[in-house]
Amino acid sequence: MTNPAIQNDFSYYRRTLSRMRLNNVPAEGENEVNNELANRISLFYADATPMLKTLSDGTTKFVSENKNLPIENTTDCLSTMASVCKVMLETQDYRSRFTSEETVPFCLRVMVGVIILYDHVHPVGAFAKSSKIDMKGCIKVLKDEPQNNVEGLLNALRYTTKHLNDESTNKTIKSMLQKD
């Protein structure tokens, strides 16, 4: 989502390889990607958030293929992870224990990622009143960070969730996620 040029760069690489083949210029063996893999890579990068889409599809597939496991097992795990991240970030006593400056952005990314996964897997999503995720609290934690550090994460919540624009979504949550 923050590097859309990668799709264009890969297309350029493919066109260059194609021209080289037409002109019988030998490619450097290990550096060439075969057509099947190139097609798969292109489809992967075609999505705005390719890794998140892959995780979401995998989690959804896991839930649908394992009907013997209650969906709550998966959604409870995801909501617990979001809550743990939120509490760690909003509680100064916990936050002061972080020894690496990378821990805060990591926790923010995990929190947003599991919210999006929850929203894709849970039948009514992360924004419903019945959701086990404190969405207002999570959004507040994000908004309390410097905007340039979290704008991509807020955009991920705005544009990659399934249920944000549902009629049942709380108006306060929708307004909190409006672009400033």
Image (tube, grey):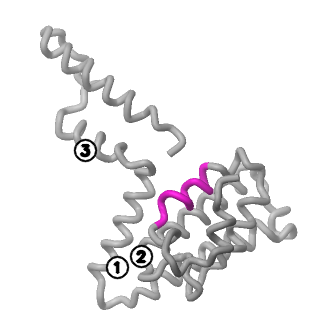
Q: As drawn, is 38 to the left or to the right of 51?
A: left
Residue at horizontal 22 percent and vertical 40 percent from the top: 39
Q: Quadrant of residue 11?
A: top left
In reply to whether residue 143 is colored magenta, the answer given is no
When the figure is inspected, residue 177 is found, relative to residue 66, above or below; the finding is above
When the figure is inspected, residue 37 is found, relative to residue 59, above or below; the finding is above
Q: Amino acid at mark 3?
A: Arg
Residue at horizontal 60 percent and vertical 58 percent from the top: 109
**Residue 93 seen in this snapshot:** yes
**Residue 30 seen in this snapshot:** no
Q: Amino acid at mark 1?
A: Val
Q: Are marks 1 and 2 in contact (CB under 8 Å)?
A: yes
Whichever of labels 3 and 2 marks the residue nearer the N terminus, that label is: 3
Q: CA distance from mark 3 to mark 2?
A: 25 Å
Q: CA distance from mark 1 to mark 3?
A: 24 Å
Q: Amino acid at mark 2?
A: Val
| Residue occupied by mark 3 | 40
Residue at horizontal 38 percent and vertical 70 percent from the top: 59
| Residue occupied by mark 2 | 121
Residue extent of the magenta highlight: 152-161
Residue at horizontal 45 percent and vertical 51 percent from the top: 49
